Image: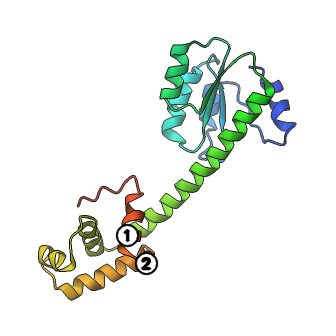
Amino acid sequence: MNRALMRDLFESVDLKVSLYESGNRFLEAMPVSGPGCILLDVRMPGISGLDLQTIVAKEIRDLPVIIVTAHGDTQMAVRAMKEGAFDFIEKPINNQILLDTVNKALEESAKLGSEMSEQAAIQARLDFLTPRENDVLLMIAKGKLNRQIAFDLGITQRTVEVHRARVMEKMQAKTVADLLRTVMSLESFSGKP
């Protein structure tokens, strides 16, 4: 893939471009997050595009990867897609198809970034709960009633109600359904103590 031609194509439609000589150079300067996308050739100096994609998928979840190659086959395309590639494009490249694919990847990146920001905000609110409030939340998530929670924790039902109200306030939930929907949206929330 001719990097200068790619840069010119993307800059012609006002897209910001960062070019790297190799996969290793990209890893040295690896951006923390998007919005953006990564365009990789399968054959690059040093680390291959597919190997770099595997690393990127683990490190930067909100930057979709588009794989480009003149040496592709079905097996390679399947591997790339299983590893999380946004798309797989074979050379020679149709500029309009490439631009359309990049624009779709940028939309996906913005969506993923927004979801990750929301997840971080929910996690921050969850981290602000006291240990006892967290215990009450876990039992609410298991479907227990206030009196059952009180019995299990060895506290009064009134104390459970106070903790429950604080959990609702801190988690910015109006109903128990809102609360559960919010915490269950977290990948890290298991509902287990």
In the rendered view, tell whether residue 169 sits above or below residue 33.
below
Q: Amino acid at mark 1?
A: Ala
In the rendered view, tell whether residue 8 sits above or below residue 130.
above
Dot 2 alpha-carbon crowd within 10 angstroms: few under 14, some 14 to 19, many 20 or more: few
Q: CA distance from mark 2 to mark 1?
A: 8 Å
Give the residue at x 59% y 46%: 32
Is residue 144 found left or right of 102 in the rendered image?
Answer: left
Q: Amino acid at mark 2?
A: Lys
Which mark identifies residue 6? none
Helix, strand or loop for disc 2 = loop
Q: Position of residue 6 (x, y in %)?
A: 79, 28
Q: Position of residue 78 (x, y in %)?
A: 51, 21
Q: If the image is split into quadrants, where does the C terminus sit?
A: bottom left
Give the residue at x 75% y 20%: 93
Give the residue at x 50% y 29%: 54
Q: Nearer the viewer, residue 179 or 83?
A: 179
Q: Which residue is mark 1?
A: 177
Image-quadrant location for residue 8: top right
Q: Position of residue 111 (x, y in %)?
A: 60, 51
Helix, strand or loop for disc 1 = helix
Is residue 97 found left or right of 25 in the rendered image?
Answer: right
Q: Position of residue 14 (x, y in %)?
A: 84, 43
Q: Which residue is mark 2?
A: 174
Is residue 51 found left or right of 42 in the rendered image?
Answer: left
